[in-house]
Amino acid sequence: MSARHRLRLNLLGATASALAICCSTPMPAAIAASKPPLPPARPVHYDPDPDICQPAALQRSFQLQLLPWADQPAAVQARLRQVQLEMLQATLQRCISKGLLSPDAARNLEQTLGTSGPEAVQPSGSRP
């Protein structure tokens, strides 16, 4: 092995050792203490407005949000419909709690959309 190769290997070994020492050494307490703690993650809930809480608007938005996936297999559409119904239930609860929708109207809308099958969803290519 030439001297040049030995020098390169020694430099690589020294660099690797320095990195191992540097990266495995814990951060000094003073530096760690000076960093502020991360804020806790909060879920964002948007307050519904009177226009959103209208049954026709809720039904229209429910169907429009499923349109991009109308060409997916039935199992995928069924799962997406279930997720959409769960989100709808949360929206309905917020509308009811704000006094923007009656419980009877919410129940009727949930039953209508929950029992309607994928035939209510048209493929995105058939939109006007």
Image (spheres, rainbow, N blue to C red):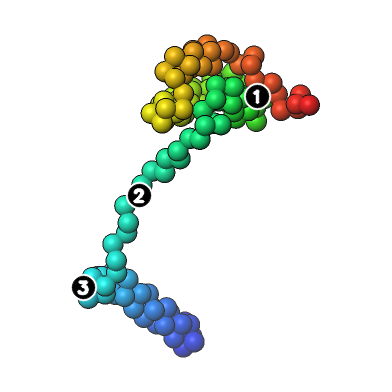
Of the residues shown, which amino acid type is indicated by label 1? Ala
Query: As shown in the figure, which amino acid type bears the numbered disc 3?
Result: Ala
Which quadrant, please, contains the C terminus? top right
Single out the residue that lies furthest toward the bottom. 3
Q: Looking at the picture, which amino acid does disc 2 mark?
A: Ala
Q: Residues within 10 Å of mark 3 (few under 14, many from 20)?
A: few
Q: Position of residue 71 (x, y in %)?
A: 67, 25
Mark 1, Cα crowd under 10 Å, few <14 / some 14-19 / many 20+, is some
Residue name at image x 34 percent, y 78 percent? 18
Between discs 2 and 1, the one toward the N terminus: 2
* Separation (CA) of disc 2 from disc 3: 25 Å
Residue 107 seen in render: no
Depth order, front residue of 49/75: 49
* Marked residue nearer the N-terminal end (3 or 1): 3
Distance, label 3 to label 1, CA atoms, is 56 Å
Q: Are marks 2 and 3 in contact (CB under 8 Å)?
A: no
> Which disc, if any, is residue 41?
2
| Residue visible at 36% across and 47% down in the picture | 42
Q: Secondary structure at mark 2?
A: loop
Which residue has dot 3 on it?
A: 29
Quadrant of residue 14 in the image? Answer: bottom left
* Residue 60 percent location from the top left of the image: 61, 24
The disc at residue 70 is 1
* Nearer the camera: disc 2 or disc 3: 2
